[in-house]
Amino acid sequence: MANTDFSRLPVYAEAEVVVCGGGTAGAFAAIAAANEGRSVLLVEQFGTLGGTATAGLTTPLMHTHIDGNPHSSYIYPLLQQKLLAMDAANPEGNRFDPLLLGVALEQMCVESGVKLLYHTFIPEVVTENGRISAVVIANKAGLSLVKGKIFIDATGDGDVSVRAGAAYNKGNPETGKNQPMSLRYIIDNVDFAALNGFFREQIEKTGVDRNAYANPNGLDMYADCCKSNPPVTLTAVFEEAVANGDLIPEDYLYWQAFGLPGRKGSVAFNCPEFFDRVDGTNPEDLTLAQVNGKKAVVRQLAFYKKYFKGFEDAYIAEIAAMVGIRESREIVTDYVLTAEDILCKRKFPDMFCQCNYPIDIHGAVLQNRYLVDEPVDSKPWYDIPFGCLQVKDVENLLVCGRCMGTDFIAEASSRIQIVARSSGEAAGIGAALSLRDGVSVHQVDGAAVREIMVARGAEYAK
Ligand SMILES: Cc1cc2nc3c(=O)[nH]c(=O)nc-3n(C[C@H](O)[C@H](O)[C@H](O)COP(=O)(O)OP(=O)(O)OC[C@H]3O[C@@H](n4cnc5c(N)ncnc54)[C@H](O)[C@@H]3O)c2cc1C
């Protein structure tokens, strides 16, 4: 495609800020830029907002591991209000219904004046003298262009940045391999009272009371079982099922389940997980994950029916249309956040987000490093600077979400949704400041971005 002249395609639309991808980061970016008075067009390949969180069924929100869990976002509490009004979140704000999260984000975009363009994929960009002048869009109407002044790459995989010529890192530098991917699913009509009884029986039988809890009210449960992190209450059950051939060994490498607010008897599973063929930018790997994933979901439901209690009338309610990609490409930006920054809890003057989530590298053996080291400044978190959003060598492009500028290890902490939300918000405001001041996105001062976030209600740890 490199030699094709896309600049002659018809222009479908034009906006001051074009947000590419409507996942968590993209939706927050679009709302934030529109709230600063800019015309915003958001292009998304699916028919919902929220990406991994909604189409990928990825709930709940992980905690920042900072006291008080500051969100580094003013849009976050507004979203939480909407979710609570729909009975789609718990009051603590960490559990949400993925389907309704998409609805709430869509409402917020529409209310902010964002123009949405769903079912539209961005395969290419048009660049002139180090600037993007348009993204190519592909949809039922064919190929056309969306022109813009500032572009925000919120595709999760950095598609737009890469097409614009940006450099990137990809995968573990020691192996070249990306983090495992997962195909998540939801099972409905689970009897939580019976499930709780089953967990209690197992605790008594094994003497292990760890990571198996279900509230008989049908709304709240948590359980996990990962081979490299034993023993938990369910270890013996998983080992028996693998020995009997009812599960395959991979089913037992990573298995995790959560209750869903507002959905009585509903369980969201953070599995099955895949350890080979895990390149989220390779369509064949994505197809394999769908095909093998669905097979695993059917197998796992049969396992619950045979070995657990409470699943007698349960059924598969949803299987994610979107494969869950933990890590693919990290775009090279003006500042690239490193493992060292995270471990020494570095602070930056252009900080927009604070986080202390563990370095969480999935694999056949889980590598989960909690960030408990004492920081030199007695503030137990690391900062993420605005420089991680300014795409190197492209004048009018910002990146946000899991593909922002980090190294592989830093991404294993910073990929959580709270950070994706904050980075989208910062990118949207950064785009608006670039337009207001008539400067390149590289000249936008991250501290000024944060001041706007704070003025609008964002909270940070002191
Ligand atoms: C299995 C799994 C479990 C996880 N568990 C948790 C958890 O429990 N808690 C937590 O906080 N975080 C969790 N995470 C991490 C977190 O959910 C993600 O890192 C985060 O949601 C990513 O948000 P994003 O906006 O950067 O990207 P995405 O959500 O991936 O959004 C990208 C969007 O861009 C669209 N898109 C992509 N390319 C194009 C294109 N070329 N043209 C048009 N549209 C495009 C996609 O459809 C999507 O909507 C998990 C991740 C995975 C994969």
Image: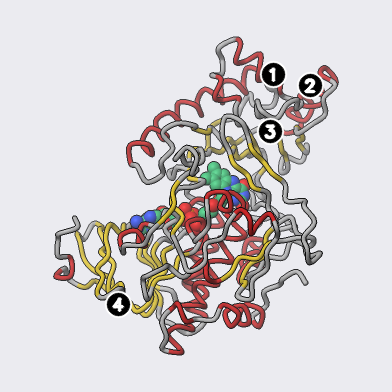
Residue at 68 percent of width and 53 percent of height? 357
Q: Residues within 10 Å of mark 1 (few under 14, many from 20)?
A: some
What is the spatial separation of the Cα atoms under label 4 and label 3, in whole angstroms?
47 Å
Outermost residue toward the top in this view: 244
Q: Are marks 1 and 4 in contact (CB under 8 Å)?
A: no
Q: Which residue is mark 4?
A: 14
Q: Which residue is mark 1?
A: 237
Q: Secondary structure at mark 4?
A: strand
Q: Secondary structure at mark 3?
A: strand
In the displayed structure image, the side of residue 145 where residue 67 appears, left or right: right
Q: Amino acid at mark 3?
A: Asp
- The disc placed on residue 202 is 2
Check the picture and name the quadrant holding the N terminus: bottom left
- The disc placed on residue 224 is 3
Q: Secondary structure at mark 2?
A: helix
What is the spatial separation of the Cα atoms under label 1 and label 4, in whole angstroms?
57 Å
